[in-house]
Amino acid sequence: MGKELTAQQKAARELIRCDLRYLFTILQNRGSIKSNYIVSMMPYQSLIIDGAEAWVAAMNNAKPGSIDAPRFTQKEKLFYDAARQSIKLWEMPYEEVYTLLEMRYAESDDYFSSLCKPIAKHLQLYDIFGADLTEDGHFCGNTILGAVYLPGYNHGDSEYGPNLRDMAVIGGKYIPTFDAMDAYEVNPNLRFYYRDYGGFEKSPVGNEFSYHFVLLSILCQVNFILYAVDQYIVPEIPTKLRFAYILYYYLCDMLPKINAKHGTSFSLNRSFYSQEFRNAMAHYKVGVYLKPNDIVPDDPMFGMTQKAFGLNFYEAKNGIYHELKLLSRQLETHLKL
């Protein structure tokens, strides 16, 4: 694979390879990650696999047989179409996001209460959900979000795990196809742990569901990027900017809606807001976004950030992460975490 590719196609192939190396790295280290990291990664995993499959399909449509890689079965297509929609969670109207999280919270409450003895159920002495945290206490995932990420998930469905593994098989096949079986260095000192919430402390943000849980979910997603991606993977890779930018983009529009509803004042600097760049981040469409003379061969994103913002990859990446770090502090302060 790679002969006769244009400069834009070579760039897209390399960006896919970098993202698949990230997936390979997590799979190689999954035994040492004591949390729901894989579930928290699901929106991004789906984005990668769906995008890679679409790129392969486009390449083979233009020149049949140019890339030997599997296509989605109908079942896989339906799964990944649904799974990648979770990347757009904050694109939904705020009221719909609130209702979705509240519904998943209630489902978890109902399921776990049904497993305990009547006295424990009456006193509500049962776990409702779990959260992932860094060793120093930063929330970076929760099982309510996990239920949102997983298409068709139902508590107690014994077949869901095996079916999920089946859906992941195609990703495993794409890793060698793109020569991505080379794990990145990871930070062995960054550890994650899992904590259940229920009983007398049903949540770190209050014992009744409220908009605080919505804010906690945003915080989990932001911190997953800041810690579980950026700090856990040692080298600077385009994957880090790709994940961070898509979250930043949607939160730029969601935060004003939350502020208007609840009188809060959360903010992100919108100077990096670009629909065209978001589309390029989401779909590996380098050839659509860059002309041949736009390509910067020695830049990790091949000139995409130069075109969007007049900044090289490192400058743009640092700017986006600066904004997410500020937002994480705002949320942690507001939630008293």
Image (cartoon, grey):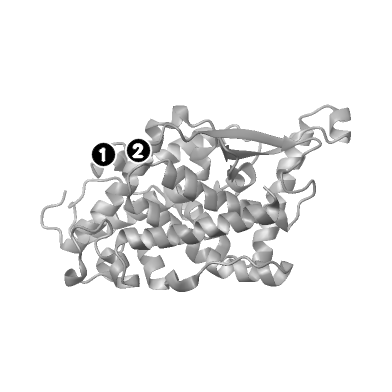
Depth check: give the residue in front, 202 or 152.
Answer: 202
Relative placement, left or right, of 58 versus 98 is left
Where does residue 328 sit, x and y in percent of width and height? 57, 55
Q: Amino acid at mark 1?
A: Pro
Q: Nearer the viewer, mark 1 or mark 2?
A: 2
- Where residue 198 appears, as percent x and y from the top left, is 75, 37
Closer-to-camera residue (97/59): 97
Neighbourhood count class around disc 1 (C-alpha, 10 Å): few under 14, some 14–19, many 20 upward: some
Quick one: SS at disc 2? helix
- Three-letter amino acid code of the residue under disc 2: Phe
Could one spot residue 41 in this view of the protein?
Answer: no
The count of marks equals: 2
Residue identified by numbered label 1: 176
Please rate how many residues cluster around mark 2, counting C-alpha atoms within 10 Å: few if below 14, some from 14 to 19, many from 20. Answer: many
Residue 79's spot in the image, x, y percent? 48, 49
Work out whether 152 lies above or below 319.
above
Q: Disc 1 to disc 2, how far (Cα)? A: 10 Å
List the residue tagged with mark 2: 24
Tell me, for residue 283, which label it has, or none: none
The residue at 66%/54% (across/down) is: 333
